[in-house]
Structures are given as C-alpha cells and as structure tokens.
Image (tube, helix red, strand yellow):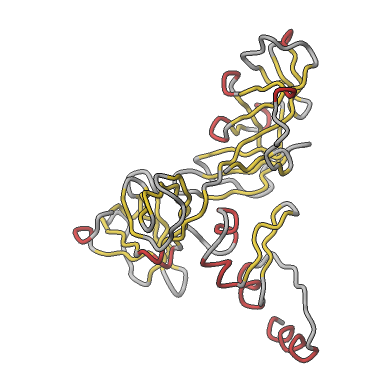
Amino acid sequence: MQVELKRMQRQLGITFIYVTHDQEEALTMSDTIVVMKDGVIQQIGKPTDIYNEPKNPFVADFIGESNIVPGLMLEDYKVRMNGVVYRCVDAGFGKNVEVDAVVRPEDIDIIPPEKSKVSGTVASVVFMGVHYEICVDCGGYEWVVHTTDFAPVGQRVGIQILPDAIHIMKKTRSNNIFDAEVWPGDDAIYIDDVAFPCDGLEGYENKDVAIVRIAPENVRLVAPQDAKLTGTVKACMFLGTHYEITVSCEENDWIAHSDEFMEDGEEVGILVDPDKMELTKKDDETDEEPEKTEGVTREE
C-alpha cells in the first residue's frame, strides 16, 4: 500500500497529506514530516532531519528509539553526560549550559571494557531479528544498544559513543503549572476540583486563586483507589534514569517521574505531599506568561 500511494502521488503530480501514527511509515513515505503532540506542531523537516536532529525529547522518543540523557555543555564540541566528558559536533550553546543529549541505540558500539572510559553490566538482551537490543547498566544509567554482536546478561562491556553519534538539544524542563483555588481554612488548594493538602497558605483568603507549580519528581502515581484525583496514562517516555509519565485528568495533563513503565490508557491516582507545592498569587504573576499546553508548561 505504501508503494501504491507513492506511485499514485508521482503519477498525479499533486501533494498528499498522509496522517499516520506509524513512525516507520512516516519516515519511508514522506518528503516532509510534521510531528504533532496534543494538536501542537513540535517539528517540521525532512525525514533525515527529524530522525537525526530532533528538536526536543518528545520528537526524539516518538520517531525511533533514543537514549535521552541530561547533560552539561562545557563548551563548543564538548559535553558531559553521566559524569563523563564526550566530544560532540554541536556548538553555540554556551559554556556550562544544561542540555539534553540524544544518542540513537544503533550509534553505540559495544567494545571491551578495558578499551572504554565507560563500562557497565549487560542487564538484558532481546533478539530483534536483524540485531540484538542490549540494555547496559552503567552505574544507575541504562544505555539501550542495538548491535549485531551478542553479549550475555551479566557480562561486563564497554560503551563507545563517537562524536557524530551525539545530538545536543536545548534543555526542556517539564513543570506542572495549574490555577488553584486556595482554601486556608481547610489547609488545602483545589486542582481539577480535588482538594490537595498544602502548606504555606498564610496571606491567602478562601477562594483566592493562585498559580501552583509542582515538579514532576514530586508527583506520586498510586493505585486509583488510593487517591481522589485519577487519570489515564497518555504517554510514557524513558529518560535513562526514569520514565516521564503524562497523565490526562479531567481538566489538566500532569507530568510525573516514575521508576516503572506504564501502559497508555492505564488508570492511576495522583498524590502530592503538602510541602511540595510552590504557590504564587495570581496577581503577582508577570504579564509575560510561559507557554502552556493543557495545564503543562515547558520551560527552557
């Protein structure tokens, strides 16, 4: 069907707009790809640009498999990831700037540990037909490697990443930012019409509206019966040390960090400790609001 559609497009000489959730299909059929999330365009480009130079972690994870690693750009062409300094081919980010780095699994080589500055233990091996998918635990960070070389579970191996295998992106931080109704008399704020116990409500009156910021690592995902606010998993992205989970609730999307993988559509409950919420009176907010997407803000 892909071949037939391409034949029709060439024969008719007109532009086709083809909508698909199949990433391989998009890469093989398209001259230009538009990657969207929640109705918002994330990146437009040629298939090679989308794959090799993703603009953000969502694009990197959505189009193909990726190792997405928090890093520090020390200077042009030099980045530190997981405490190790690597040469790269990117420049213009400044010095000592936090970034995200993308390394595709097929661009990582497994070599003898004594020949590498990074080594780890093979945690799992899956045969994929044309290659092995090997997960290597390097002291808390797990690299996903695609290779034709077999390495058994438990074997010590070295990891080699060449400069052109590293793609640097501007750092994106996911913060939960919501409007909340404050009720000091109940020591609580209301988000999505659900009461959350909250500290630091001095100076507020009942029914005041505040901006609440909650870091993803402070959002606890629990069984639905253990929380008043529940939602369904909308996306699950592995970031090397944890999963970033997007949970769709009645009014807002929540971002949480978890050690466990969660399936799309899985129902979960949301809890936040009272001292993990940062409140700002809405009147004190500047006129320059950060860009919002369904209650979740991406801040550089």
Q: From what the image shows, is residue 239 above or below residue 132?
A: above
- Residue at the far bottom: name it: 11
* Residue 258 on image: x %, y %: 53, 39
* Residue 105 on image: x %, y %: 44, 63
Q: From what the image shows, is residue 218 above or below residue 300?
A: above
- Residue at the far left: name it: 114
Judge by depth and name the residue closer to the eye, 148 or 298.
298
When asked about the image quadrant of residue 280, the answer is top right
Is residue 35 shown left or right of residue 276? right
In the rendered view of the protein, which quadrant contains the N terminus? bottom right
Judge by depth and name the residue closer to the eye, 75 or 271.
75
Is residue 113 shown left or right of residue 281? left
Q: Residue at x 41, y 65 (%)?
A: 165
When asked about the image quadrant of residue 153, the answer is bottom left
When asked about the image quadrant of residue 63, the answer is bottom right
* Residue 129 on image: x %, y %: 46, 73
